[in-house]
Amino acid sequence: MRRDVAIVSWASFETPSEPARNEVEMLLPVIQEALGKVGLSQRDIGFTVSGSSDYLQGFPFAFVGALDAVGAWPPIRESHVEMDGAFALYEAVNVLQEEGIDTALVYAFARPSRGELDRTLTLQLDPYVVAPLWPDARSLAGLQAQALKDKGVDVPDVPPTHVADGAVAVVLAVGDRARALTGNPVWIRGIDHRIEPPALGVRDLTVSPSTETAAKVAGASGLDAAYLHVPYPHQELVLRHALGLNGQTVDAAAGPTMVGGLERFAAAAAAISAGRAKRAVAHATSGPCLQQNLVAVLEGAS
Amino acid sequence: MTDVLVADHAIEYTYTRSTGPIIGAFLAGLRDKRFVGVRASDGRVLVPPAEYDPVTSDDLTELVDVADTGVVTTWTWNDDPVAGQPFDRPFAWALVKLDGADTGLLAAVDVPRDEMRTGLRVHARWADERVGAITDLACFTAGEGEGVTQGTVGEPVAIVETPIRLDFSYTPGVAASRFLRSVEKGEIVGQRCPKCQKVYVPPRGACSMCGVATDEELTLSGKGTVTTFCITNVPSPGLDPPYVTAWIRLDGADITSMFLIQECDPKDVRLGMRVEPVWAEDKQPNIGSIKYYRPSGEPDAPYDDYKEYI
């Protein structure tokens, strides 16, 4: 990266089921908290990008409606990924390489408790030979867990798919701007994401070569902590192996779908800025059975 | 405590997709009760076939017949089937590597739970009616099948139709719930932005320009001014042409809302016309409780009053 990018602020919210507020009402205080902690308003933000899935809300272009929580006036430079917010952060890190864009707001939100997440996630699968069978997300994770068992790995049972509502916002800034905004910028030293073939039967589900490659490109060595995005518990074992973790502090969480990966960045940044970790990996996954993986290396001031 | 409204909501659509020659051949094979794979760059046979090599991304073209019998490479027991799945009772999902193939095909397996295991030999059970879709393969079941069917595959399937449906228990949010409850009482409430003072109707809980919560609520008279309109001359369900749809700036609001204009000749509708709501007798917490707007009889609003909203 030509320009150093740091996480300067974050806020997150998770609840098993948000009873009353809609996505915008749930997201707004989270964005305000993240911006407010470093004294910024939306007008100070050079690039805004979000991760969410309209299928969870049940409306086309629901992600555009979420901009109500941002205050997109005068018109802002904005983007969206139909993925976990961590992949939106990846886009933000790249846009921050441009001269003139010094700050970015990244957010993610989801309220899957209103639908049937195990079926909604089916729509991310191959539409010809897989999705018409409506395999539920938990069952696909079960195939992976059994493959691990058959290899002799002691794996936990596959629990029901973690359904939670929530939102997360992360503020990024470059170089001196980051130092001016906070005494504890958490620098993103490297970041990469890789994807595996879409056909489940082509992959060896017991390993995660995409995580390995992403970690290598991101420079994931010399770590003392790892914040792993783990939708199902057995996946932690696959990720530990792919990242070569051995003795590091590992914090694994599922989080709300579309939110959980970006939340790992917030959790890692919180640990580093509080001095509980020095150099940590933040990881996010997307797709069935760890199909796509993003790895970033975060570090406090040396 | 907010009085939360909840409504059933579904999205439903039948996707129509072209298949291409490789997936098309695989689906044509299923229609003929046989399996067709494709040879990958490294010599492996992929079933289901892929158009492009999963490692090198090369075009793949060599179709290979494989058996209707194979082996379970991994599996899981599904205690809670969901809508659309092959069975509505507990069943096993598995990846099945067919004899002659090197990769697993996802399918249901119809065997008792205590007989399900990795390494189980299974064969295809076909649907009675086959249309050239993955569902032509009903499931796998234990034991040996017919083996490999040789010969030319029928005409590749060109198109598949896949219906999807997702169901939601929809809640509109705090601000919209309060608005709909006010409508149920024959009132229209809006919310004011504490920053720019703009009034939103219906309220959305946030000012989309300032990105702040709008918690100050106010009740509007309901009267308004036509800022622009459209006369429609083709029929629509429940509406006889010609009918008029208008954007109306409600008095006190800073955004316009769309309503029908009735009880007047379409040719008399004009910008600046003053209008009032006609409420349904049986009011519900939905916007249909305002049946339409009609002329209020007041003099037209001056252009300056609504020029920002055209």
Image (cartoon, rainbow, N blue to C red):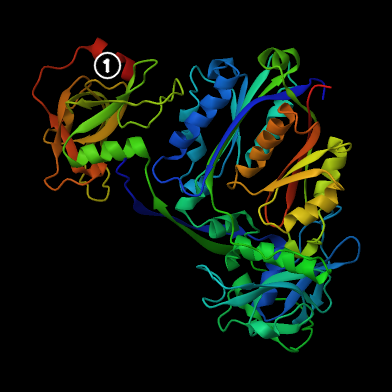
Neighbor class of circle 1 (other Cα within 10 Å; few <14, some 14-19, many 20+) is: some
Considering only vertical position in the picture, is B279 above or below B47? above
Q: Residue at x 59, y 81 (%)?
A: B127
Taking the view exactly as shown, the residue that stands out farthest to the left is B297
Judging from the image, what secondary structure is the residue with disc 1 in?
Answer: helix
Determine which quarter of the picture holds residue B255: top left
Q: Which residue bears the numbered disc 1?
A: B306
Q: Is residue B55 left or right of residue B137?
A: right
Residue A269 on image: x %, y %? 70, 31
Residue A258 on image: x %, y %? 60, 44
Residue B203 on image: x %, y %? 33, 31
Q: Residue at x 89, y 60 (%)?
A: B41
- Marked residue chain, label 1: B
Residue A135 on image: x %, y %? 61, 65
Q: Residue at x 68, y 28 (%)?
A: A92
Determine which quarter of the picture holds residue B156: bottom right
Q: Nearer the viewer, residue A275 or B206?
A: A275
Q: Nearer the viewer, residue B264 or B216?
A: B216
